[in-house]
């Protein structure tokens, strides 16, 4: 209605000046009104189609993810730390209370993990008795919400058909799909990272004053904290937002100052409350000497998201095409407008480049949607400018889908590791329950998971070249049992401890064995 009034006012003042009688310019004005109505109708129809396509994409993703969930969990060990924290929050115990005995010489993780993901699992502990399957269902819905946030964030950068294709390709990627079945913080972290991006961009677009601006700042500050409270590396959102604010406005704005102040206050509160930063930082020494190797590993990990399971050159060829499109898309996006998504990867990668972290595909997850977004912006430009653009679009989507299919087919075992529910594992648990007392201490490679699932005191060995020093550690923690296995879990460590047992055979008495595990009593 407002646009119609503007057209009427402009038309009545401008059209008579173009000449003709009153009847002719009134006909022109009616034509303008009709064109406006058609444009509004097309826009409304387009929004409806986009909404329907988005709903269908999210629904089908939900069906696919939920239908492929598996009961139980693998030997990842990180999940156990989160579940222990969640259980403690649900039952009112001290947050870091656990029967896991920390070995500072074996860097398997900090004693305390950030609290947001465990807090999100508390309702499952209270209402569903800690069901891992229900936790995984919760995780799937978190990812579906993330897709919705990505749609809101990316919709001004891509036409809706390309945007829906982008969201579908993100959802179908095997290396993202695998996280639906692993109770670690990746899905929640992805949600809060992209929610922070969206709220920052919306805050600038609305440009509200007074209490409206305060409300926007509070939402941004909370989202940034939730990202940090899920994974400590989320702290990089603060300098990324600060740098974006300065580049965009040439000076700090009250929106950024208020949001960052709130986020920092919550970060300080969390660290004081938990008495820990909940990350790997304190265990590691930063150095620029790691940059080259870490960057190479990061590129290899990013390329692995487009592996096909059969043909390595095909993986690198597809990654090269995507990278070229991403560079083009980044240039186009920077010409249009700068956003926080351009700055975040720089700050996010920095800790991984200067710290001696064991790289993993999980660390690349937040960058994959941004990388694909830039590639699709570049693709959209080719579609717009060249008559063969549609063929390029179809060819790229087909190549991506074929690579996904190959990975699902060829790498299914690596995407879905052995469950803790195997018969050999259950036999071991039954033996431990019957034979091991609450005063005994077990040494096992995945101590946190074993402690969670058995309730026993458990620690982990470390690779120590001096046998006597390792014996000193065993005596210090009063270790009474050692369990070796399964062989496919951390094979280097398993080989080390097996050789240690062979060298000290007279000090170990075998008490249990099956195809996957061997348990010794330490004499």
Image (spheres, rainbow, N blue to C red):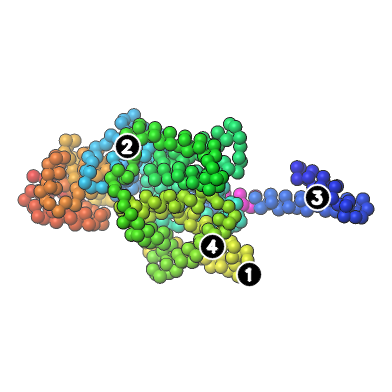
Direction front: furthest residue: 250
Of labels 3 and 2, earlier in sequence is 3
Q: Residue at x 55, y 45 (%)?
A: 250
What residue sits right under mark 3 in the picture? 33
Foreground mark, 3 or 4, reads 4
Span of residues in magenta: 48-55
Q: CA distance from mark 1 to mark 4?
A: 18 Å
Q: CA distance from mark 3 to mark 2?
A: 64 Å
Kindly state the secondary structure of the residue where label 1 is placed.
loop
Of labels 3 and 4, earlier in sequence is 3
Task: Say whether residue 388 is magenta.
Answer: no
Kindly state the secondary structure of the residue where label 2 is placed.
loop
Q: Pointer 2 and pointer 1: residues touching (CB < 8 Å)? A: no
Foreground mark, 2 or 1, reads 2
Q: Is residue 222 above or below residue 470?
A: above
Left or right placement of residue 2 versus residue 381 in this view: right
What residue sits right under mark 2 in the picture? 276
Residue 223 spot, x, y in % from top left? 48, 40
Q: Residue at x 34, y 52 (%)?
A: 354
Residue 208 found in image quarter: top right
Of labels 1 and 4, earlier in sequence is 4
Mark number, residue 328 = 4
What residue sits right under mark 1 in the picture? 387
């Amino acid at each position: 209605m407002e646009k119609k009034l503007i057209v009427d006012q402009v038309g009545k003042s401008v059209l008579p000046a173009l000449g003709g009688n009153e009847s002719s310019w009134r006909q022109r004005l009616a034509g303008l009104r009709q064109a406006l109505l058609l444009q509004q109708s097309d826009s409304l129809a387009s929004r409806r189609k986009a909404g329907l396509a988005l709903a269908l994409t999210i629904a089908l993703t939900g069906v696919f993810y939920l239908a492929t969930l598996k009961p139980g969990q693998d030997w990842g060990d990180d999940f156990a730390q989160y579940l222990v924290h969640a259980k403690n929050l649900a039952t009112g115990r001290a947050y870091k209370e656990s029967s896991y005995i920390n070995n500072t010489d074996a860097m398997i993780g900090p004693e305390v993990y950030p609290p947001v993901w465990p807090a999100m699992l508390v309702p499952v502990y209270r209402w569903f008795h800690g069901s891992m399957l229900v936790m995984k269902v919760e995780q799937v819905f978190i990812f579906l919400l993330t897709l919705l946030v990505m749609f809101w964030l990316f919709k001004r950068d891509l036409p809706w058909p390309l945007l829906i294709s982008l969201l579908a390709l993100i959802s179908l990627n095997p290396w993202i799909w695998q996280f639906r079945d692993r109770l670690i913080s990746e899905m929640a972290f992805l949600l809060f990272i992209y929610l922070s991006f969206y709220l920052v961009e919306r805050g600038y677009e609305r440009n509200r004053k007074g209490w409206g601006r305060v409300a926007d700042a509070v939402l941004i500050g909370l989202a940034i904290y939730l990202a940090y409270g899920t994974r400590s590396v989320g702290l990089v959102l603060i300098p990324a937002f600060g740098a974006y604010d300065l580049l965009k406005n040439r000076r700090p704005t009250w929106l950024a100052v208020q949001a960052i102040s709130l986020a920092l206050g919550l970060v300080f509160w969390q660290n004081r409350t938990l008495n820990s930063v909940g990350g790997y930082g304190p265990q590691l020494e930063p150095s620029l000497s790691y940059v080259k190797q870490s960057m190479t590993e990061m590129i290899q990990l990013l390329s692995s998201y487009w592996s096909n399971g059969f043909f390595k050159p095909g993986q690198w060829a597809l990654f090269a095409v995507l990278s070229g499109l991403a560079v083009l898309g980044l240039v186009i996006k920077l010409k249009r407008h700068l956003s926080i998504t351009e700055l975040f990867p720089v700050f996010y990668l920095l800790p991984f480049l200067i710290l001696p972290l064991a790289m993993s595909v999980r660390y690349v997850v937040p960058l994959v949607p941004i990388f694909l977004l830039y590639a699709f912006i570049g693709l959209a430009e080719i579609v717009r400018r060249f008559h063969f653009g549609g063929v390029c679009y179809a060819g790229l989507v087909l190549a991506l889908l074929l690579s996904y299919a190959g990975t699902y087919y060829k790498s299914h075992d690596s995407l879905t590791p052995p469950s803790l529910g195997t018969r050999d594992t259950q036999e071991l648990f039954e033996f431990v329950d019957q034979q091991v007392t609450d005063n005994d201490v077990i040494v096992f490679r995945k101590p946190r998971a074993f402690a969670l699932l058995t309730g026993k005191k458990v620690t982990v060995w470390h690779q120590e070249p001096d046998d006597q020093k390792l014996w000193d550690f065993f005596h210090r923690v009063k270790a009474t049992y050692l369990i070796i296995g399964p062989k496919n879990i951390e094979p280097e460590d398993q080989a080390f401890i097996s050789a240690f047992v062979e060298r000290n055979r007279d000090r170990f008495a075998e008490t249990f064995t099956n195809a996957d595990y061997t348990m010794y009593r330490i004499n």
